[in-house]
Image (cartoon, rainbow, N blue to C red):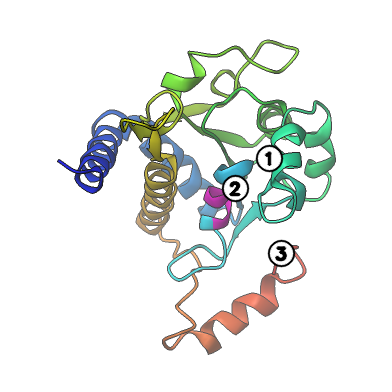
Amino acid sequence: MNAYEKYYAAAREQLEKVYRTQRGAIEQAATWLGEALVKDRWLYAFGTGHSHMLAEEIFYRAGGLARASPVLEDLLMLHKEAIEATYLERREGYAAELLKQYPMEGGDVLIVASNSGRNAVPIELAMGGTQRGMKVVVITNLAHTRAWPSRHSSGKKLADVGDVVIDNCGVHGDACLELPGIPAAIGPTSSITGMFIVNAIVAQGIENALSRGVAPEIYISSNSNGDEHNDKLLRKYKSRIRHL
């Protein structure tokens, strides 16, 4: 097989493993989300580095929940100072400042994603969610997190501080494909499996709410017939969601 074929096979295998082995954890997260939606509560999501894409995945998109907010910090993402973000995500105390910017409350659901699970900001943000009475859903790579020590002074990793832990079933280091002449593996997979996990939680959570007689508000594609529908939601929630 060439690299294209090998990468496809590895990504498919990991996605299948998530489907087979993480169903219980995903369904538990969806149960909590369904309960939150029935009670007019909120979904939040956070990640640093490339994991921030999982936070953006829940937000303001076709078929996505209106009552969903990402926790986004420019300096922890990659579009401004990528090198600085690598070091900033290790800084203890930084998550507390982020939490002040969002009206998270008990009864809300918080997804925190980190492939390594060893850096201070995701760990402390998950801890902060628990302190606020939220259900905290962790998405991480257990193969990687078991291979390296925590960078947090408590010695805890992200997998130690969630109410439920969902393994993205990736390999140590995330990249899955080794090629002669390249000093390390290529072909990361955590975004592929992570996006599936997040959307599976949302889809099942919506169905769970429907089974209890509540139809959660969702966005419709603005490139089809969604503008009027979405405008009502945007007017309703703009003052609540700081990124709208």
Front position among marks 3 and 2 = 2
Q: Residues within 10 Å of mark 1 (few under 14, many from 20)?
A: some
Q: Amino acid at mark 2?
A: His
At a point 43% along the width and 68% down the height, the residue shown is 63
Indicate the position of residue 105 as horizontal and vertical percent values: 72, 44
- Discs 1, 3 touching: Cβ within 8 Å: no
Q: Earlier in the sequence, mark 3 or mark 2?
A: 2
Q: Secondary structure at mark 1?
A: loop
- Discs 2, 1 touching: Cβ within 8 Å: no
Magenta span has 54? yes
- Residue 125 against residue 107 in the figure, above or below: above
Q: Nearer the viewer, residue 72 or 229?
A: 72
Front position among marks 1 and 3 = 3
On-image quarter of the N terminus: top left
- Residue 67 against residue 92 in the figure, above or below: below
Please indicate whether residue 102 sits to the left or right of residue 35 in the image. right
Q: Disc 2 and disc 1: Cα gap in Å?
A: 23 Å
Q: Earlier in the sequence, mark 2 or mark 1?
A: 2
Q: Residues within 10 Å of mark 3 (few under 14, many from 20)?
A: few
Q: Nearer the viewer, residue 175 or 73?
A: 175
Indicate the position of residue 236 as horizontal and vertical percent values: 68, 75
Q: Disc 3 and disc 2: Cα gap in Å?
A: 14 Å
At a point 56% along the width and 45% down the height, the residue shown is 50
Residue position marked by numbered label 1 in the rendering: 106
Residue position marked by numbered label 2 in the rendering: 52
Find the magenta span and give its range. 52-56
Indicate the position of residue 54 as horizontal and vertical percent values: 52, 49
Residue position marked by numbered label 3 in the rendering: 243
On-image quarter of the C terminus: bottom right
